[in-house]
Amino acid sequence: MTRPQSASEAFVASLPDATRARFEPVFSPLVEIVPLPLTVTINAHDSAVFSSANGVRAAPDGQGRIAYCIGSATTKVAQDRGWDARQMGTDADGLVKNLRSVAPENNLLHLSGVHTRGDVAGRLAKAGLNIKNIAVYDQRLCPLTPEASQIIATAAQVVVPLFSPRTAAQFLKVTPNTASVHAVALSAAIAAVLPADALASLTIATHPDAQSMGAALSHVA
């Protein structure tokens, strides 16, 4: 598991019992989430845009303000933090499309990581919405743990779920030999980073969500 520890543990816990029983989880986060100081004031009539649960956790409590979110998991975390959270799609394209349709007139703050995908704020600004991108956390790259390195080097089959292009690129950088690796990518954009001919197999989830990733895992190896 290459996501940050809490996200990896939550994903494993969400798997169906039959799927979880087939695997021995090894946690080796390739990204560390580091909150950053908030550089702007969020006013009572401002609304947030959240493309990940990490953004919600690094942001202030919602205090009833509106938040437009990607995915049900991020929406639920935002609701728990006091935001009037509304799911606006399952990926960046869906969020941009739906926000263009809603066209909120108040100020929008995309509270994200330093490294973002989908150019959410840029595309919405071009559509005429009043939006700024504010980084509220950093995603610092990490090496594989010694245990994970040993397993990849010696095991006959290793299944590696990958949830972002940046994590996929880091995995390749720190993994000299991927011949035993069955990679499962959350999206085609992540799969495009991976050299399919150097892997044991490459599977792409049908939708960019945890349920589809779990379904993809159930058919691997």
Image (cartoon, rainbow, N blue to C red):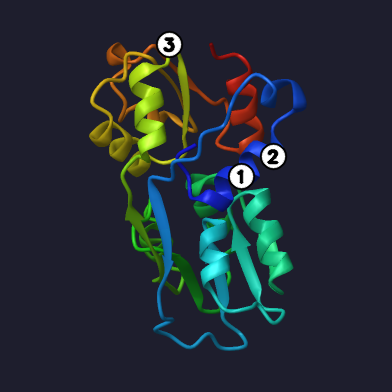
Give me the disc on residue 9: 1
Give me the disc on residue 186: none
Q: Nearer the viewer, mark 3 or mark 2?
A: 3
- How crowded is the residue under tag 2: few (<14 C-alpha within 10 Å), some, or many (20+)? few
Residue 16 pos. (x, y %): 74, 28
Q: Secondary structure at mark 2?
A: helix
Q: Nearer the viewer, mark 1 or mark 3?
A: 3
Asked whether the viewer can see residue 90, the reply is: no
Asked whether the viewer can see residue 22, the reply is: yes
Q: Return the residue nearer the eye: 160 or 147.
A: 147
Q: Judge left or right: residue 120 versus residue 206.
A: left
Q: Are marks 3 and 2 in contact (CB under 8 Å)?
A: no
Residue for point 69% across, 82% down: 63
Residue for point 36% across, 41% down: 167
Number of callouts: 3
Q: Earlier in the sequence, mark 3 or mark 2?
A: 2
Q: Measured along the vertical axis of the image, is residue 32 above or below residue 191?
A: below
Q: Spatial distance from mark 1 to mark 2, Cα to Cα?
A: 6 Å
Task: Residue under label 2, please give it.
Answer: 13
Task: Residue under label 3, please give it.
Answer: 156
Amino acid type, residue under disc 3 in the picture: Ala
Residue for point 33% across, 43% down: 166
The quarter of the displayed image where residue 135 is located: bottom left
Q: Earlier in the sequence, mark 1 or mark 3?
A: 1
Residue 43 pos. (x, y %): 56, 88
The quarter of the displayed image where residue 158 is located: top left
Q: Spatial distance from mark 3 to mark 2, Cα to Cα?
A: 25 Å
